[in-house]
Image (cartoon, coloured by chain):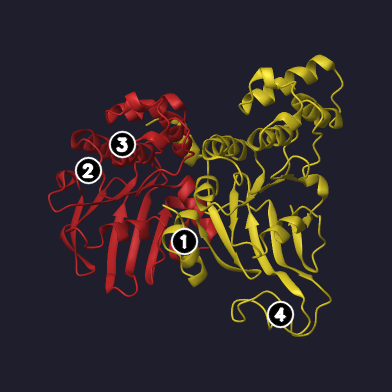
Amino acid sequence: MTGTTAAEIVVTGLCKRFAPRETVLDGVQLTARSGGLSLVLGEPGSGKSTLARCLSGVYRPDAGDVTYRLGGRGEVTLTASDARTVAWLRTHHIASFDGHLAAAPRLSVGAAAARAARCSRSSAIAALRRFHVAHLASVPIGRLRASDRLTVALAAALLAERPFVVLDEPEACADPQHLTRWLHRLADGGAAVVATGGLDSPLASIATAVGELRRGGIEWRKR
Amino acid sequence: MTSNAFDDWADRDALVPPEPVISVRGLTHRFGAGCDRCIQLTGESAGTNRCSVCGTVVAVYDASFEVGPHEVLGVVGESGSGKTTLLRCLHLDLRPESGSIRVGGHPLQRSAVMMVHQNALAAGLYPRLAAESNVAERLLGRGARAFAEIHDRTTELLGELGLRPERHTDALMTFSGGMQQRVQLARALVDPPTVLLLDEPTTGLDPSVQADLLDVVQRVTQSLESASIVVSHDLAAVRVLASRIIVLHHGRIVEEGISEQVLEDPQHPYTQLLVSSRLT
């Protein structure tokens, strides 16, 4: 995937506060490089989802920078970019999983995944098969249970195979073995992957960097 | 790795978006004679878009945005916020008082823009003519003359948009609102416009028709190279269709962001109110 297009996600001094609650992220530093998986662990409520959403452009941080670099193609600081650039990055360069897939409710699961990942329906169905939800391919997405819908959203995000991958607690929605294999494949292909997970995340065994999110900052255990 | 997915991003050699198709700068339109204090006495701080001195309504003030190819921009806001005036300016039904609307660096021409209206009559369709005749009329306008070619193309387009063949020859006035919008979209596909405007595409339709139509509209906007702008009250519909949203309030753009950002992390108090008022 990479060759001359090494991908890198660099986060510096990231802060996010939700008034009137106290600060959720306070000076987060993180670097994810091509071929690596940076795993951020944390207790429920520690700010993992907030971090994932700041990285994928859904949340606007109060301070700090999130920069995406792609080899010779340049770099974009997400936090300093206009909405059009953020939308472009999310459509073409960042595969993110941070919630349900927004799709027309009557659209079949296979078609919705294919449309989200911008690939063929057969590729989408193959991806759904890996997460044991291929039998839902012809079901309208509006009729899915919330848990199945999350699994479909995760399959669509991974299927998109972008150079930057940001996943919020993916292990909650997929078989760990298949997920691990898929993330290996993405990293081997040159993607820079950031994932969040619970303290006992099965992804820790394959992560190249593991940190724990505590009191708004990441304490790195393995880098 | 699937070659499809790889090609999709590998072929894009830039991390920044391409040049916009349509670029709107400082668009302003007032209804009324206007006075020196209209702008100062309206907007967010004044809590109204009506000037208390001269009664002029500042429908849209200083609106600036861009939309690129294959991109869909959502415009949301309450009734009277300026959505329709903005759309009418973009459709050249109204001549803006100031500001510019440029397509490819040139002033917008009527031939470059097409609007899918809430109702067929406003779209200039012929209610007594068959659905296929309404589509054929646009094909004829684009130079098609062979009957077989016109018939095949209209059948294909209406079929693509989910209209059953037995309804193709029915008069448009016998169609539901959702079906009439499909006919308008079929006309858009005949000769894709540079800028496609969608005015409340799901408003007034029952939920099952809305759901079907959302799929059709998404398919059309993704397949066209056009820049699409969808105006709607329906935040759920806008989230499905648009990658970006601008929020209008008292004629001003008060917030702009990617759809997920605006709907999940709204920054402006009005957007926060709008989002929190959604039925769940």
**Badge 2 density bin: few <14, some 14–19, many ≥20, Cα 10 Å:** many
Report in which chain the residue with disc 3 lies: A
Asked if the residues shown at circle 4 and circle 3 are in contact, with their CB atoms under 8 angstroms apart, the answer is: no
Report helix, strand or loop for mark 1.
loop
Spatial CA span between label 1 and label 2 = 33 Å
**Badge 3 density bin: few <14, some 14–19, many ≥20, Cα 10 Å:** some
Q: Quadrant of residue B45?
A: bottom right
Report in which chain the residue with disc 1 lies: B
Of residue B10 and residue A17, the one placed in the foreground of this image is A17
Spatial CA span between label 4 and label 3 = 51 Å
Q: Residue at x 48, y 72 (%)?
A: B269
Q: Which chain is yellow?
A: B
Answer left or right for B22 relative to A47: right
Residue type indicated by callout 4: Ile
Q: Residue at x 68, y 17 (%)?
A: B166
Residue B39, disc: 4
Spatial CA span between label 1 and label 3 = 27 Å
